[in-house]
Every structure is written in structure tokens, then in C-alpha cells.
């Protein structure tokens, strides 16, 4: 015979005339185990004395009143009739009492508890994903990856790490990176981890590295405006102001032609050159761009005429003067045109004019020194050259005369030579 749901073997209670098992009894009519307490409460009383300070220590004993037979008391000494034992189920096994249903409050508590657990798991996963994302795109990691991309010559990967692409992108190419790397490679990158737990939306990250073996440092501002753990560089390029120093000279920076007053480059070595045989560059033509927050970078260079350029300049001016001096007409060019009528009424006969250079003017032309125009190296000016002697036929009061000489006529002033075109153009004040 097996036990019931309480784990105890069934026993026949002769006094009560029923099968019992611990706190349960077998209800033959209902064919199930039921609690004994529902009936025993009416027949038996359990008294639990309240403990006091004077109570003797010892095991607790409950008082028990035997149940009385229904129909009245049994005479002293008379036998108590015993009911026949009730049969067990057909399979010979003691019936197992049914499980009690959980109260509604317990069910709600279990469900709520389960939801809390699921929520905690979900939040844990979310926090784990967030932490992994943040760790993989931490500000210092973005800067390190950016400089490594530049060192590898991968402009596309580098630009993808910028929060916004620069407007001037001529020099932000693989070719420009290759030229810069050939002049000085980016190496030995050491990124400092930003201090402080609350990073905010913009973090300045300091980097120490070498360009062409020269130790440099810079501050790269990394931003996360969306606050989603994805960090990008607010400004990873360097701006360099050129002004008009190289205008018209076919200037190149890292081998790339430039025609603007400013350029935007990746960190690295930056070299300016010109492709014009008439000019030379002196001073600093190579810069190290390391810090995107350095807006003071300038090429400390001087643009000068080369020997070939100086010779071309002198030849162009002298040729122009010779042509103008040789003219017999009132209109000769070079700023030495003559009016037909003078203020005293004298009329100069066109086609009869002879011009010649004064001695001091000839000396200046023989030793002509170019004067550069500030901000426009392609334009070169001459100094003031001097006066011109003029003779011509003239008409005075209706009478024609030959060999007339004149004072205060226009002289050769200063010529401006444009050497950016071929042949050079000479203009006069």
C-alpha cells in the first residue's frame, strides 16, 4: 500500500471507522482524501497553553477528548461497536488527495514576480549591449582608429569617422595621403583615455604620436550628439590659410593642384610647390599638421622671381618701351601719348614725332629691378622709369615749324608685368 500526498501510509482508525493518513481521511462517498480538521474540529479540542515566564520547560502536549459514539453515551464496560473498514480503491493504492488551488493573490504575486525577473533580464541584456557598443566605439578608440586609417592611406575609412565631411575635400584623398606618408609617416600613436566618468556629448582626447619620426601631439574633439554610444570626430582635419601667396603660380599641395586661399588636409606632412619656372619659393615650404585645433598654421614662404623670371620681366619691359619710343604717332602707348593741341594753342603734327629716352631713364632700364606685388606674386612692378625727350613738327599760329621741342609732356611711369601668361603682358600707369 503506497502513501498519500502527505507522504504517510494509510491506517484504519477503529474509533472513527475510517482510513486516515496523517492529517487526511478517506471520504468513501467522494472517493477522495479530505482534511481531517473539518470533522475533528467538532469532536476534538486542542488546547495550546500560552507560555509564561513560570512555565516549566518541556515538550508541548495537546489535550485530546475522545470522540463519542453518535446516539448517546456508551455504558461503562460495554464494547464499542467498530464499523467495517472502508474499501480502498480498486488498484489497491491509497488515493492521493488533490492539490489545493492557489489563491488569486498568490497567482498575481507569482506572475508579477516573473515579470520582474523577465524585465531584469531584458534590462541586463540592454545594458550589456549598450556597454559593449560604448566600449567598442569609445572616444579614445575612435581617435586611434582614425589615425591608423590615415597611416594606412585609407581616406574613405578616415572620412567615415568624421561627424561631418569638410567642404574642401580636394586634399582628402588616397593620393594625397600617399604623398604625405612618403614625406613623413604617422607612427607611435598613444591616445590618452579621457578622465571622468560622465563623458557628456563632447570629449577632448589628447594624442601623442610621430610624423616622420618627429614627436607631435594634438587634441581631437570626439562627439556623441545622439547619446547612443556612437562616437565620431567633430573635427579631425586641419585648415591651413594660403591667402594669395601662390595665386597664378600653378601651386600644388602634396601633389594636388590648389587654386583657393585655404586648404583642408588630414594630419600629416604638408608640402607646397609651384609649377612655374619664372618663380622660386624660399622659406618654409613643408608643415607638420598634427592638431585639428591649431588654426595658426601658415607657410612661411617668400615667392621670388627666378633668374629666368627676372630676365623675362626685364626683356618684356624693355621691349615694350622700345616699341613705344619708336612710334611717330601721337598715340604711342607706355603712358607717353601726346595730346594734339597744347595749352598755348600749339598743334603737334601727328606722324612727325621723335621720342628718345633721357640718360637717367636709360640707366634704370639697364638695371631694372622687379618689385613684387603683395598678395599677388604673378604681378611684378617696375619702379618709376623717367622722362622722355620729344621733338616734332608743329603748327604755331597757322605756321608750320620743324624741330619743335616740348616741356612737361608725359613720361614713362611704372609698368606692371603679368608673368602668369605667355607672352607676359605689360601695363602702364
Image: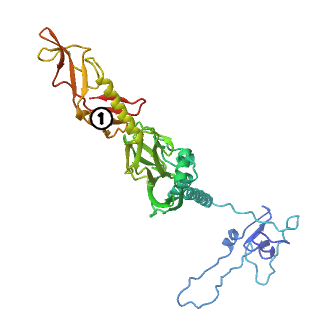
| 104 or 297, nearer to the observer | 297
Q: Residue 247 vs residue 122: left or right?
A: left
- In the rendered view, would you say 99 is above or below 378? below
- In the rendered view, would you say 55 is above or below 15? below
Q: Residue 158 vs residue 299: left or right?
A: right
Q: Tell me what residue is drawn at x 51 percent, y 53 percent.
A: 231
Residue where numbered disc 1 is placed: 365
Q: Quadrant of the N terminus?
A: bottom right
Where's residue 143, x and y in %?
A: 51, 56
Q: Tell me what residue is drawn at x 47 percent, y 40 percent.
A: 275
Q: Tell me what residue is drawn at x 21 percent, y 23 percent.
A: 390
Where's residue 188, x and y in %?
A: 53, 62
Where's residue 306, x and y in %?
A: 40, 42
Q: Quadrant of the C terminus?
A: top left
Where's residue 182, x and y in %?
A: 55, 52
Q: Tell me what residue is drawn at x 39 percent, y 35 percent.
A: 312
Image quarter of residue 373 = top left
Q: Residue 337 vs residue 127: left or right?
A: left
| 98 or 374, nearer to the observer | 374
- In the rendered view, would you say 79 is above or below 407? below
Q: Is residue 199 visible?
A: no
Q: Secondary structure at mark 1?
A: helix
Image quarter of residue 243 = top left
| 248 or 385, nearer to the observer | 385
Amino acid at each position: 500500500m503506497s502513501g498519500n500526498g502527505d507522504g504517510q501510509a494509510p491506517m484504519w482508525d477503529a474509533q472513527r471507522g475510517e482510513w486516515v493518513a496523517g492529517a487526511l481521511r478517506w471520504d468513501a462517498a467522494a472517493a477522495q482524501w479530505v482534511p481531517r480538521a473539518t470533522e475533528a474540529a467538532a469532536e476534538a479540542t486542542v488546547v495550546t497553553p500560552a507560555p509564561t515566564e513560570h512555565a516549566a520547560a518541556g515538550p508541548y502536549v495537546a489535550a485530546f477528548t475522545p470522540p463519542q459514539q453518535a446516539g448517546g453515551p456508551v455504558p461503562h464496560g460495554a464494547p464499542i461497536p467498530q464499523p467495517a473498514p472502508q474499501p480502498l480503491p480498486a488498484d489497491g493504492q491509497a488515493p492521493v488527495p488533490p492539490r489545493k488551488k492557489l489563491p488569486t493573490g498568490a497567482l498575481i504575486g507569482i506572475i508579477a514576480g516573473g515579470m520582474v525577473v523577465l524585465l531584469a533580464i531584458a534590462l541586463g541584456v540592454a545594458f550589456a549591449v549598450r556597454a559593449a557598443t560604448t566600449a567598442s566605439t569609445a572616444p579614445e578608440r575612435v581617435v586611434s582608429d582614425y589615425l591608423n586609417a590615415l597611416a594606412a592611406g585609407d581616406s574613405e575609412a578616415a572620412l567615415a569617422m568624421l561627424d561631418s565631411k569638410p567642404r574642401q575635400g580636394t586634399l582628402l584623398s588616397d593620393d594625397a595621403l600617399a604623398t604625405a606618408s612618403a614625406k613623413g609617416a604617422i607612427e607611435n600613436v598613444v591616445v590618452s583615455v579621457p578622465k571622468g566618468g560622465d563623458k557628456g556629448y563632447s570629449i577632448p582626447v589628447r594624442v601623442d604620436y610621430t610624423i616622420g619620426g618627429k614627436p607631435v601631439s594634438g587634441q581631437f574633439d570626439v562627439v556623441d550628439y545622439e547619446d547612443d554610444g556612437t562616437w565620431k570626430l567633430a573635427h579631425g582635419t586641419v585648415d591651413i590659410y594660403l591667402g594669395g601667396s601662390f595665386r597664378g603660380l600653378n601651386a600644388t599641395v602634396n601633389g594636388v593642384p590648389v587654386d583657393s586661399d585655404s586648404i583642408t588636409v588630414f594630419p600629416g606632412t604638408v608640402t607646397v610647390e609651384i609649377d612655374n619656372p619664372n618663380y622660386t619659393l624660399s622659406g618654409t615650404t613643408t608643415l607638420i599638421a598634427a592638431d585639428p585645433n591649431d588654426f595658426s598654421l601658415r607657410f612661411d614662404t617668400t615667392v621670388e622671381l627666378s633668374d629666368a623670371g627676372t630676365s623675362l620681366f626685364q626683356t618684356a619691359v624693355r621691349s615694350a618701351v622700345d616699341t613705344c619710343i619708336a612710334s611717330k604717332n601721337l598715340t604711342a602707348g607706355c603712358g607717353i601719348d601726346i595730346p594734339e593741341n597744347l595749352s598755348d594753342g600749339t598743334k603737334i603734327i601727328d606722324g612727325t614725332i621723335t621720342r628718345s629716352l633721357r640718360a637717367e631713364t636709360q640707366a634704370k632700364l639697364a638695371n631694372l629691378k622687379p618689385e613684387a606685388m603683395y598678395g599677388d606674386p604673378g604681378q611684378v612692378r617696375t619702379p618709376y622709369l623717367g622722362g622722355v625727350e620729344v621733338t616734332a613738327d608743329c603748327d604755331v599760329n597757322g605756321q608750320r615749324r620743324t624741330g619743335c621741342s616740348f616741356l612737361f609732356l608725359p613720361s614713362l611711369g611704372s609698368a606692371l608685368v603679368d608673368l602668369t601668361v605667355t607672352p607676359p603682358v605689360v601695363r602702364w600707369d
